[in-house]
Image (spheres, coloured by chain):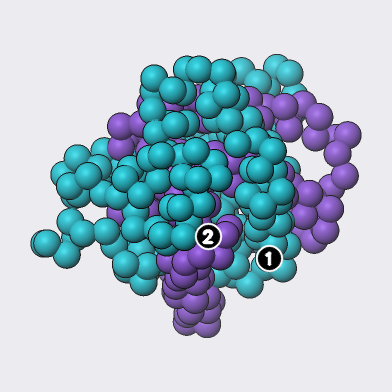
Chain colours: A purple, B cyan
């Protein structure tokens, strides 16, 4: 049953990424050119609603379907880790025009070239794991 | 129904993303796609090379199901929920892409055919763009501890300062790529 829930969440994500055009290289380029509100509207709406939902969950102590408290793990503070890592991610986001969710969505949408992007994203993750201890965190 | 077949407006799309996050929270999970890349490394045996990949990947199987859903979602959206959807991007951007960067497909395709069409993706320059872009996304997402879903959506929704720093990084990187490096690459 739970597996169906995960698949449904992914299904909704995939359909949304494609239909919203957040999976389009052109929309990402346009966003970084500040030439349209579209992408900012998508992210902004998701974050504003997300903040409200998280606050509701915390204040009303809303439980998950299994009856447990919904936990939010605070992230460890670090500037170099998030800033340098973030910039590297952003360089790739601007170049390939896709973040991880849309990469997979686009394969389903019929663009096999994204398999190259995914393969190298896995390699990038692997290289990070290899040299992690030598990087500022 | 007609409405669903049209490109979705930003407010519907943003609400749908918040709904995805909520569904996963209610299932005791956190929305974050790039964690799957680490899981895939572990499944492929990367734990033999680096301790970073030695973890119980079976506990992350749920996230792989989200990916399966995202792939099926892309298939359904492209084949049954749209009639050759073409992003209605700013005409100034179309002109810029066509004239400055030689993207003739701007304004008439979902992705730039010059890079993403399978025939082109196998020639050297488009291949390098796809490969290098993917590498930076994979490396950067793990370094930053998350991608657009984990930080820009889940993290910002929980008002996490580290996520805000990561998102600022995402945008700095994207701006550097598009404004400083694109003129050198294309």
Q: Residue at x 41, y 60 (%)?
A: B91
Q: Give the residue at the far left of this rendering.
A: B1
Front residue of this view, candidates A75 and A1: A75
Q: Chain of mark 2?
A: A
Residue at mark 1: B164
Residue at mark 2: A31
Image: B157 above or below A6: below
Which is in the foreground here, disc 2 or disc 1? 2
SS at mark 1? Answer: helix
Instruction: Determine if residue B161 is in view.
Output: yes
Instruction: Determine if residue A119 is in view.
Output: no
Q: Residue at x 37, y 67 (%)?
A: B10
Does residue B43 appear left or right of residue A38 in this picture?
right
Does residue A77 appear left or right of residue B183 in this picture?
right
Q: Residue A16: image x %, image y %?
A: 33, 55
Front residue of this view, candidates A113 and B105: B105
Q: Residue at x 84, y 47 (%)?
A: A137
Image: B18 above or below A121: below
């Amino acid at each position: 049953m739970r597996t169906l829930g995960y698949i449904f969440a992914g299904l909704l994500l995939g359909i949304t990424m494609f239909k919203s055009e957040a999976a389009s290289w052109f929309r990402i380029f346009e966003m970084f050119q500040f030439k349209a509100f579209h992408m900012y509207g998508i992210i902004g709406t998701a974050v504003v609603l997300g903040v409200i939902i998280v606050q509701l969950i915390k204040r009303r102590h809303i439980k998950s379907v299994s009856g447990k408290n919904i936990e939010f793990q605070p992230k460890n503070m670090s500037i170099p880790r998030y800033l340098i890592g973030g910039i590297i991610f952003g360089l790739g986001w601007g170049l390939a025009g896709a973040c991880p969710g849309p990469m997979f969505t686009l394969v389903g949408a019929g663009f096999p070239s994204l398999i190259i992007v995914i393969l190298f994203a896995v390699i990038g993750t692997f290289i990070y794991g290899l040299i992690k201890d030598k990087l500022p965190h | 129904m007609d409405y669903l077949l049209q490109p979705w407006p930003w407010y519907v799309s943003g609400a749908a993303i918040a709904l995805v996050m909520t569904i996963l929270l209610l299932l005791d999970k956190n929305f974050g796609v790039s964690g799957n890349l680490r899981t895939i490394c572990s499944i492929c045996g990367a734990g033999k090379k680096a301790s970073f990949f030695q973890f119980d990947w079976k506990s992350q199987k749920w996230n792989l199901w989200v990916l399966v859903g995202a792939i099926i979602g892309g298939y359904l959206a492209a084949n049954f929920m749209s009639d050759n959807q073409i992003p209605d991007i700013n005409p100034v951007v179309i002109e810029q892409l066509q004239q400055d960067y030689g993207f003739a497909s701007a304004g008439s395709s979902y992705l730039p055919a010059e890079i993403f069409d399978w025939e082109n993706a196998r020639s050297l320059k488009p291949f390098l763009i796809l490969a290098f872009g993917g590498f930076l996304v994979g490396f950067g997402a793990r370094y930053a501890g998350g991608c657009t879903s984990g930080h820009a959506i889940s993290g910002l929704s929980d008002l996490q300062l580290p996520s805000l720093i990561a998102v600022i990084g995402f945008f700095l990187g994207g701006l550097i790529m598009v404004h400083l490096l694109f003129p050198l690459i294309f």
